Structures are given as structure tokens and as C-alpha cells.
Image: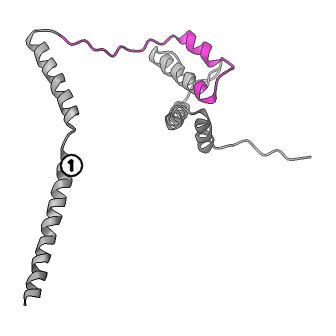
Amino acid sequence: MENNENIVSQQTNVPDNVDYIEAIKEIKNNTVNKEAYLKLKEENKKLINSLVQGETLENTAKPEIVDVKELRKNLFNKDQSNLSYIQNAIKLRESLIEKGERDPFLPYGRNIIPTDEDIKASERVASVLNDCVDYADGNSDIFTSELQRRMVDTAPIRRKK
């Protein structure tokens, strides 16, 4: 009979342990690193003090001034990797669009008027290039490999004579 009581008491302890483990997991998931909390608390204190004293906080992030001429010069530099070329092309495109100039990824010519389909295609190209640059994380070989993986070669196969 004592054996039965031991078995019962062991079984009742198991669920309690599970509850403790779940409680510990929940605490770990819902708590913040003390250093991060103290840093945030200090920033809030500075903000409140500046508001009380009537000061304004300056936005330290200044917009990046892009020189289009310099970007074009860098774009056509022959000694650069595929990755740096595409990064320069994307920066040039973004700065030209911001200034209200035409998108360099759109078709251009005397009798050519870009259609909605052309605009969507240029956005798709820019998106794929940005994805490849982000994926490469600074490695030109990885960028080239990822770009080739995503591109579809539509050139016809030449027949040997």
C-alpha cells in the first residue's frame, strides 16, 4: 500500500515541476535585460528634463546629401565589383527619383513613352537588385550568385554550324 502512495505522490509532483518550468520560461520571455532597461530609463529622464526646462532635442540624423555627378562618376568607374556597381546604380536611381527626374531604369528614347507595365518592371528590377544586395551582406561573389539565381536567361541558344 505504501508503494501506491509513493507512486501517487510522484505523479502529483510532476505537474508541479512542469508548471514551474513554464513559469520560468514565461518570466524569461517577458523580462528585459537590466542594462537595456537602465539605458532606456536614462534616456527618458533626459527627455523629461529637457521638456521641463523648455529645451528641444535636436534630431541627430541628418539626411544624406547625395551628389548625383559623383554617383555617375563612380557608376562608370571600371575598377569595381558587381556589388559596388549595383549599389551605386541604386543610389543614383533613388536620388534622381527624389529630385523628380526620370527613373534611369525606365526605357528612354525619342518616340518612347514609358507605360504602366514599364514602371512596374523597373520597380521589380530595383526590388530584386535591393534584395540581392541585402542578401550578399557586402560580399560581391554572393551578390553575383544570388543575382544569377534570380535572373531568367531569355537569350536564344545559338546553333553550331
Q: Most extreme residue toward the bottom, as rendered?
A: 1
The region drawn magenta spans: 56-85
Q: Position of residue 76 (x, y in %)?
A: 65, 17
**Residue at the spot x=59%, y=43% of the render?**
150
**Residue at the spot x=63%, y=41% of the render?**
148
Query: Which colour scheme appears in the figure?
Result: one colour
Q: Position of residue 154 (x, y in %)?
A: 69, 43
In the image, 11: left or right of 111?
left
**Residue at the spot x=62%, y=22% of the render?**
108
**Label 1's element?**
helix
Mark 1 = which residue?
28
Q: Nearer the viewer, residue 134 or 41?
A: 41
Q: Most extreme residue toward the right, as rendered?
A: 161
Q: Nearer the viewer, residue 76 or 126?
A: 76
In the image, 89: left or right of 13?
right
Most frequent secondary structure within the magenta stretch: loop
Amino acid type, label 1: Lys
Residue 5: quarter of image: bottom left
**Mark 1 burial class by Cα count in 10 Å: few <14, some 14-19, many 20+:** few
Q: Position of residue 99 (x, y in %)?
A: 46, 14
Q: Is residue 66 magenta?
A: yes
| Relative height, residue 51 to residue 41 (above, below) | above
Q: Position of residue 132 (x, y in %)?
A: 54, 36
